[in-house]
């Protein structure tokens, strides 16, 4: 395993809390101004979680019987359109992130350290267009030279998850074949994306989906925290050293089908 392709939210950082607060920041005053039922935290899970931003806006508005014009993606955040509210949420997210910050999962940082010691390559693959800001706020931006996020996908016309294309692009930018890369995901769409590509391994991080569900979606391995992978990573490094007669300057030979058997 030479490359490790990490999702961001729920894998490297607990960013869902920031998103929840940003949605509340958007909809609490909006619903009050429209005389609608107040916004509740439960609304995030019922109507927004896991959906693209504008779909989340549509779903929440429908739950309150509110109809707004669609508008355009370029709508100003001050406009009361579906796209305007979505853009307003993005502003609220950035403001909330700046105020509250976000810390990476310690176990995920421990795995990043272990991968670095083993000479592996890492990349972030996130549907969010805010991935660079989140990585910077979490203090781990300098660990990732390759970030394929929602902005990159839009710019390059890359299909999003559950298609595997964003992960394939990240492997390409690392200069590695996908067959030598692992996908690490916690979301259903992300696990499906990894399972539908020619990747060596799909790791499902159980942040609530459930281990059985992650396996059914295509994960090869499931963990609660990413540091559970470190012993296997270290054993693989030791085995590589043995194959190379203990000479760390000699590249490990490519694993063959016979080795896997």
Image (spheres, helix red, strand yellow):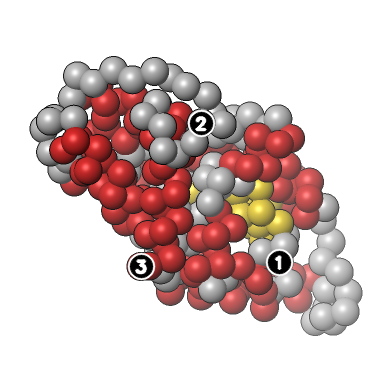
SS class of the residue under badge 3?
helix
User: Which residue is depicted at the point 67% across and 78% down?
Assistant: 117
CA distance for labels 2 and 1: 42 Å
Q: Which mark is residue 100?
A: 3
Residue 238 vs 30, above or below: the answer is below
Q: Quadrant of the N terminus?
A: bottom right
User: Which residue is depicted at the point 72% across and 62% down?
Assistant: 145
Q: Position of residue 16 (x, y in %)?
A: 36, 52
CA distance for labels 1 and 3: 32 Å
SS class of the residue under badge 2?
loop
| Residue 260 appears in the picture as rendered | no
Q: Which numbered disc flags the more N-terminal residue, 2 or 3?
A: 2
Tell which residue pokes out farthest to the right in this image. Answer: 250
Q: Which residue is tagged 2?
A: 75
Judged left or right of residue 71, residue 67 is: left
User: Which residue is depicted at the point 18% across and 25% down?
Assistant: 64
CA distance for labels 2 and 3: 27 Å
* Front label number (1 vs 3): 3
Q: Position of residue 234 (x, y in %)?
A: 60, 74
């Amino acid at each position: 395993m030479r490359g490790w392709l990490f999702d961001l939210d729920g894998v490297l950082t607990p960013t869902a809390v920031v998103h929840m607060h940003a949605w509340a920041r958007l909809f609490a005053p909006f619903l009050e101004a429209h005389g609608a039922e107040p916004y509740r935290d439960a609304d995030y899970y019922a109507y927004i979680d896991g959906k693209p931003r504008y779909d989340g806006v549509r779903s929440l508005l429908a739950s309150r019987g509110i109809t707004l014009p669609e508008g355009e993606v370029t709508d100003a955040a001050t406009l009361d359109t579906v796209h305007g509210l979505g853009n307003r949420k993005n502003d609220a997210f950035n403001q909330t992130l700046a105020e509250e910050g976000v810390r990476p999962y310690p176990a995920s940082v421990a795995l990043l350290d272990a991968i670095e010691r083993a000479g592996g390559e890492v990349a972030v693959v996130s549907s969010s267009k805010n991935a660079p800001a989140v990585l910077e706020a979490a203090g781990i931006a300098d660990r990732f030279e390759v970030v394929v996020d929602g902005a990159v996908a839009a710019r390059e016309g890359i299909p999003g998850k559950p298609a595997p294309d964003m992960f394939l692009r990240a492997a390409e930018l690392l200069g590695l074949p996908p067959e030598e890369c692992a996908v690490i995901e916690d979301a259903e769409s992300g696990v499906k994306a990894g399972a539908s590509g020619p990747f060596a391994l799909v790791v499902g991080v159980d942040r609530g989906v459930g281990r059985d569900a992650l396996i059914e979606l295509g994960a090869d391995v499931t963990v609660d925290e990413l540091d559970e992978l470190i012993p296997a990573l270290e054993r693989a490094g030791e085995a590589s050293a043995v194959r190379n007669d203990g000479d760390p300057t000699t590249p490990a030979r490519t694993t063959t089908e016979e080795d896997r058997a």
